[in-house]
Image (cartoon, rainbow, N blue to C red):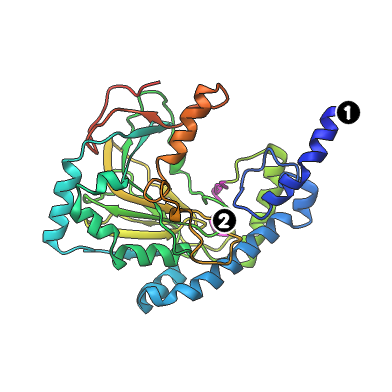
Amino acid sequence: MLSKIKAWASMPWYAMQVLTGQKAFKGNPILTSERLNRRGLHVWRVRTAHRLAAYRRRKLEHLVAAEDREAFDRNGYIERRDLLPPDRFRQVMKEVESLRMPAREMYEGNAVTRRTPLTPDVLANMPALRALLDSAEWKNRISYVGSFRNEPVLSIQTIFSDASPREKGKDPQTNLHMDTFHPTVKAWYFLHDIVEEEGPFTYVPGSHKLTRRRLAWQKRKSILASRKADGGSFRLQATDLKYLRLPQPTVFSVPANTLVVGDTFGFHARGPSSRPSVRIEIYATQRPNPFIPFVNLDSAVLPFVRGRKQVIPWYFEDLLLKLGIGRRRWYPVGAPAPGEPVPQAEG
């Protein structure tokens, strides 16, 4: 009886999550209801979120050139090579290579993802990189693709392929997948030449579009996820690209000084690496509540939040661990240079 009372008392909270970015098909009896998803709950969330994203992008279309808008509408990403003049790029590289700041790592299969947060304290000593991150060339493309004029989460990201000290097996990020049910943005500014043998980013052109076949696919996946209590980052099976009438992925074997900004509702993956490799990039992501119609509602207006969106979740992770109710996902690794291997993460 007590558990039933608790469940009913929690229903308003579960109902509110329908209008948030909550994607996991577990923990919420409304979102995980197979009956409701058969009747179209998940499809309604997908369709509504995309309509709102299109509405917000129309308000932001003045931020980017027509050729960028056309490329995004067609492919789901914007690619810009030679983003910086050579002298400015060399200055950015010099600052990144000399950086020694606290970083954390996550382990997935045999891959390691390291992030060094670009907080205000870090950027105070990196004027060339700060100028890039403050520039319209950087900000406006991320805002348009993400459909919000918000401050993104920022870090220097290092990907070590075939290098995990804790786990072995296939890197799950090499499976084509969507990040979540609604349009969202990630950006990668590659600091070195990317070759096909070393795990380049890949993206299925046009897979950001909400076609009738994609909606049917989303509905089927939501029903299956309801049964399995899945996480909500749907992955493609071998036959799905043909069913969805989508092309093979574009492989971003690109030169250094290339920026790629993509909507990660579209199918993407980290390409498989045929040998141990290291990839270093300036990384940004942005994922506000997709049901907000306003383009400027940003938690970064709060003094402590501004510039610290990468580290704040780590503070909460540390707190939950101390309370004995959390688990470690991001491991502190001291203050290595980007790309510098460390023998073993702490904790």
Quarter of the figure with residue 243: bottom right
The amino acid beneath tag 2 is Asn
Rendered view: 211 above or below 220? below
Residue carrying label 2: 289
Secondary element at image label 1:
loop
Is 271 left or right of 263, judged from the image as shown?
left
Q: Which mark is residue 114?
A: none
Is 25 left or right of 159, judged from the image as shown?
right
Residue carrying label 1: 1
Quarter of the figure with residue 28: top right
Is 64 left or right of 334, judged from the image as shown?
right
Looking at this rendering, what residue extends furthest in the right direction?
Answer: 1
Rendered view: 347 above or below 210? above
Nearer to me, 47 or 71:
47
Looking at this rendering, what residue extends furthest in the left direction?
Answer: 87
Rendered view: 85 above or below 324? below
Query: Is there any visible trace of residue 78 in the rendered image?
Result: no
Is 178 left or right of 227, judged from the image as shown?
left
Magenta region: 233-242
Q: Quadrant of the C terminus?
A: top left
The amino acid beneath tag 1 is Met
Q: Quadrant of the N terminus?
A: top right
Q: Residue at x 45, y 52 (%)?
A: 302
